Structure formats: C-alpha cells, structure tokens
Image: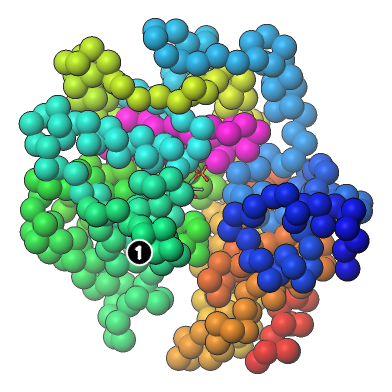
Amino acid sequence: MTTPQSWEARAEAATLYGFTDLPTIHARGTVVLTHGEGPYVVDVHGRRYLDANSGLWNMVAGFDHPGLTAAAQEAYARFPGYHAFFGRMSDQTVMLSEKLVEVSPFDRGRVFYTNSGSEANDTMVKMLWFLAGAEGKPQRRKILTRKNAYHGVTAVSASMTGKPYNEVFGLPLPGFLHLTCPHYWREGKPGESEAEFVARLAAELEEVIAREGADTIAGFFAEPVMGAGGVIPAPEGYFQAVQKVLKAHGIPLVSDEVICGFGRTGAVWGCESYDFVPDAIISSKCLTAGFFPMGAVILGPELADRVQAASEAIEEFPHGFTASGHPVGCAIALKAIDVILNEGLIDRVRELTPMFEAGMARIGEKANIGEVRGRGLMGALEAVADKASKTPFDGSLSVSERIANACTDEGLICRPLGQSIVLCPPFIVTEGQMAEMFEKLEGALDKVFAEVA
Ligand SMILES: *Cc1c(COP(=O)(O)O)cnc(C)c1O
C-alpha cells in the first residue's frame, strides 16, 4: 500500500518507533499527521481523526487552543530559552513554582522541574536516596510500587513500572519491589468483598515492610488511577489503608499525578478525588496541556524542608536538566493551568462525566466486554472471550489492536492496552463529538467481535 516516496514509507525508513506494534505498522503504514483542529488530528492525506486519547492523555485543551498558542508565541518572542542552574532562573519559573504550590494540596512546598514524567519520578527517587545518605540511613533505598503501574521509561522509572516488557532490558534494577495491582475485578478472590480486598492489600504492604525492614525502604509511589496499566481506579478506601501503614513506618507516599493531575478525574488532583494528601506529587502531561515537554516534582512541606536541609549541608543539590524550568515551558504551563482551572475546563470534565459513563456502560452490556471502569474522563473497556469467567481472548487474536485499527479506519483514535481499549478524550469535546466517539467505537467493536467471538 505504500510507495517508496510515500510519507508512510519515509516514516518507517528513518525513525525507530517506540511502543508501536511493528506488524501493524508494516501492514497498515504509519499515520503521519500534519496538524490538529480542536479534538481532531489531520493526516498528510487530509483524513481527520477524532483523538479519543488526547494525544497521549495530555492535549486536554485540544490541538489548536488559541490562548495557549498565543502564550507560547509571546514567550518565545520574549525569552526563548534559559536554565535554572547556578542561582539564575527566569521570572516565569518563579511564578510557576508559586502557582504550583498554591494549587497543590500543600500549604507550602517546593518545586523541581524536569522535561518529562519519567525524569520527574527519577528525580524524586534521587531526592529520596539523597535524603537517605544525608540523614545517616544509607540503606534506606528500596522503592515500592505496584504491578501494572506505569511510572516511565528511564532506567529508574522503568524499574518502578510494573510491566513485564521491561525484562528485555534486564530491569527492574535491584531494590524495586512491586506489590499487588489494586484491580478488584481481576485480582479480587472469589467471594472477597472490595473492603476485604483492600484489607488484604494493606496486610501485604505490612508484610513486605516487615520482611524487608522499614528502614530499608525509601518510598512508595502510586498513581491515583493507574493509567497505562489499563485505567484502574483505586478501590474504595485503598489509599486510606495504605497511607496508614506507610505513616506508621515513616515511609513517604508519592502520588504520581502525571495523568490524573490537572483535571482528568474531575478534581485538580487525583489525590483530591481519592481524599488523601501525599508527601509529594509528580506532575507532567497535562501540566502544559501537552504544549511543551515539562515535568515537575512538587514536594510537600516536610520533604521540602528535608531536601533543603540536606542540600544546605553540602551547599547544593547536585541534580538538574539543561532545560529544567525553561521560560517558555513555564509560561505555557501558567497559561495551561489558567485555562484548565479558570476557563472552565475542569468544570467541563465534571459536566461530561455522566455522558461518558453512560456511553461506557451501554457498551459494557456487550457480551464480549468484561469490565467497564474509569474515573472522570478516563475509562477503559476490557474485552473478554467469556464474560462470566472473565476469560481473556487468546493473545494471538490481538483483539484490542484489531479494535483500535478498526477505529482508525472509522476516523477515531483510541488505544489498545492489554485487552482493553482506553478512552480519555480532551476536556474540550462537545456532546456531539462524544456521541461520535461512542458511535464509531461501537461500530468497530461490533465488526471485530463478529470476526473473533
Ligand atoms: C506518562 C507517564 C509517565 C512518564 O511520563 P513521560 O513524560 O512519558 O516520561 C509517568 N507516570 C505516569 C503515571 C504516566 O502516565
């Protein structure tokens, strides 16, 4: 289907793909895009796709928000680049830090900037290791996360990620421990109530801490709703139970809000939706509404004081990226936060959630949809060969890839994840566009289930 000079062939010739199913690309060609319009993206052939995944969770204000584009242009015209080393930083960086602390659940704190979510998690781990050394507990280095968690791709954040694909890199590194995934539908035992499931997970955490030794553990990281693990909302009471155990042992709880932060769950933070206050927050993706690569570690008061004291003791915190706190990125983030919080985007998430949930529930009635789950404007539909026994389709059928490809043919972008299909539309979608999303998805599901079921 591709000629040697086609965009598809050129895309394949010189680019090494990340997280891309290569047989699909060989068979179908890359979708090469030129621009976006609201929640749609347009390819080199002029085909439009409704992007039900907001790019990669992040383009929550759509692909052509005029206020964000103008803020970026103004910032580039004023100060196109600077760092935040050696006692210098841009005025935009100062203002963004104040804003992030203001909108955080903390009454005071400090912010450290990175270029991505992975680097923000990596930086947080280095901060915890720095504290371990500085506070005379050098053995306090182990990191606890959950199976199926996604925390990024650097050597450390991939070690935190609880996915089997990291085995090909010889990861995780030693000292990264993965607890049970808090997915009640899949992991709950027959006859076990949700409350009993939560109690079992808290007991497991207690056992792991007892086995490893509390003074060997640097921190516990968790996404309020697991994103790339398949959109898995925490069960009722989970964070309260886990935090109680962590507090008793002096282990910090870090909320990885790279997806949940800035509105996705219907509150500013996922921890707000789940009613807990962590010791630190990791932010990225929606921080700039996807208009600039940026990540941030937001430390609550206690960790901020400890990292500051440890840094004072050796006269610096020896860490940072060349583009940390980039003035253009900070200006865009300030505008993005303003757009999300003050121009009604977060209200829009709350308004759209009932329609989103109703659409998902309707599709969930299909014989081959085992579970429908989500929170706010993030959801997943898990395909099963048999609903009653929750038996997945044979992996060789690539059911979720086929569904996603059938959607692409219909002009809808949505992502296969395991045997699930993920939906996380931009916050600016209209009711009509939401209806279009479900209509196209349903067409694709019916087509693929007719082939495989
Ligand atoms: C995407 C993601 C990351 C990694 O962010 P990158 O910018 O891709 O490095 C970390 N944590 C969570 C929860 C994410 O969804």
Question: Which residue is rendered at x = 21% and y = 70% of the image?
Answer: 200
Q: Looking at the rendering, in which quadrant would you find the N terminus?
A: bottom right
Q: Nearer the viewer, residue 181 or 173?
A: 173
Question: Which residue is rendered at x = 24% and y = 25% of the image?
Answer: 307
Measured from the top left, where is residue 188 in percent x and y?
32, 77
Question: Which residue is rendered at x = 40% and y = 24% of the image?
Answer: 320
Residue 316 seen in render: yes
Q: Nearer the viewer, residue 17 or 128?
A: 17
The image shows residue 118, relative to residue 413, as above or below, that is above
The image shows residue 356, relative to residue 67, as above or below, that is below
Residue 260 seen in render: no
- The image quarter containing residue 199 is bottom left
Q: Is residue 288 magenta?
A: yes
Question: Which residue is rendered at x = 12% and y = 37% of the image?
Answer: 138
Measured from the top left, where is residue 9 in percent x and y?
82, 57
Measured from the top left, where is residue 294 in percent x and y?
53, 32
Q: Is residue 266 magenta?
A: no
Identify the residue position indicated by label 1 in the image. 147
Q: Is residue 27 left or right of residue 100?
A: right
The image shows residue 347, relative to residue 146, as above or below, that is above
Mark 1 surroundings: few (<14), some (14-19) or many (≥20) residues within 10 A: some
Number of numbered markers: 1
Tag 1: amino acid: Lys
Q: Nearer the viewer, residue 176 or 149?
A: 176
Q: Is residue 339 left or right of residue 38?
A: left
- The image quarter containing residue 412 is bottom right
Classify mark 1: helix, strand or loop. loop
The image shows residue 63, relative to residue 112, as above or below, that is below
Measured from the top left, where is residue 53 in percent x and y?
65, 55
| Magenta extent | 277-299
